[in-house]
Image (spheres, grey):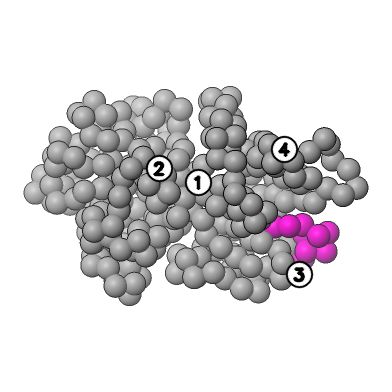
Amino acid sequence: MSGINAETKLLGVIGNPVNHSLSPIIFNKAFQACGLNLCYSAFNIQSNDLEAGLQGMVALGFLGFNVTLPFKEAVLPLLDSIHRDAKMAGAVNTVVIKEGRLCGYNTDGSGFVDSLDERGIKTTGKNILLIGAGGAAKAVAVSLALQGVQSIVIANRTLSRAEELSYKVASIGVNSWAAPTEDIKREDFLKTFDIVVNATPIGMKSLDEPLLLPVQNLSPGTVVCDLIYRTNGTRLLREASKRGFTAVDGSGMLLHQGALAFQLFTGQKPPLQVMRKALSVALCQSM
Ligand code: NAP
């Protein structure tokens, strides 16, 4: 793209706040690399303006938009169609506008699975411990269940939310049950998992936060994932690496959910290496 002109089509991310979003940098680099006359921006909107904002994007011929906190659930009733994964997760992070119709998708969970896949980590048949039952945990749980994992145990501070999510996973046909967060401190409990995923914000603030779980109690070969992305890692991931476990941070999920959204918006294969580089530069600059 040589520059914005009268032919440029628009896209963006809506949320509140969104001024920290790395999406405009990543998407605009990707559009440029593919020679697409598209421009992606960030729109901070108020809850009261959500419906008007969506109608405005349709009226202005936007190709689509991403959705971040706190609107991932709130947009659902405003859409014309919702894809299976998003419906099951109860949240939408990508909306494609086709002939004036708003079509919702959720690429967060598939982005997580793709981030493991590219590192050669298979999820099929594996026993998963998922810590957290919020929006990200729901998307990840649904995608893992649809991949055909063996089981997903959900540990969450509010047990009723873990129970709710485990019913959803079980309805997909995967063994699932809820556990109180005290269980994740127990050695016999932790030994039973192949992949452990932190889907809470614990560890986001600093490396001095209390360790989420006693990493020494995990079985050898366990893969430790944290959905948090920080350039210098989290305490959980650092501890896991130090003890020889494979540690996976959330930047891969962020990259792949964006790559899947790119494909939905443009119908083209995403320029993954361009997006990866843009993300890595943006992450360093945001620290
Ligand atoms: P959310 O919907 O607000 O859910 C937060 C979850 O964490 C809930 O299960 C909550 O438990 C739990 N939690 C929060 N504070 C806690 C605490 N102090 N102690 C114990 N549990 C606590 O948030 P989300 O959107 O799912 O995001 C969760 C994490 O994933 C964040 O760190 C976010 O940055 C990350 N994330 C990463 C990506 C990516 O692309 N890598 C994408 C989305 C999110 P209760 O149910 O008890 O409140």
Q: CA distance from mark 2 to mark 4?
A: 24 Å
Residue of label 1: 256
- What amino acid is at disc 3? Glu
Q: CA distance from mark 2 to mark 3?
A: 34 Å
Q: CA distance from mark 3 to mark 1?
A: 26 Å
Labels 1, 4: front one: 4
Labels 2, 3: front one: 2
- What amino acid is at disc 4? Gln
Q: Over which residues does the magenta segment extend?
A: 55-67
Labels 3, 4: front one: 4
Element under disc 1? helix
Element under disc 2? loop
Question: What percent of the width, then of the height, locates residue 124?
Answer: 28, 57
Residue of label 2: 118
Rendered image quadrant of residue 215: top left
Element under disc 3? loop
261 horizontally vs 150: left or right: right
Residue of label 3: 99
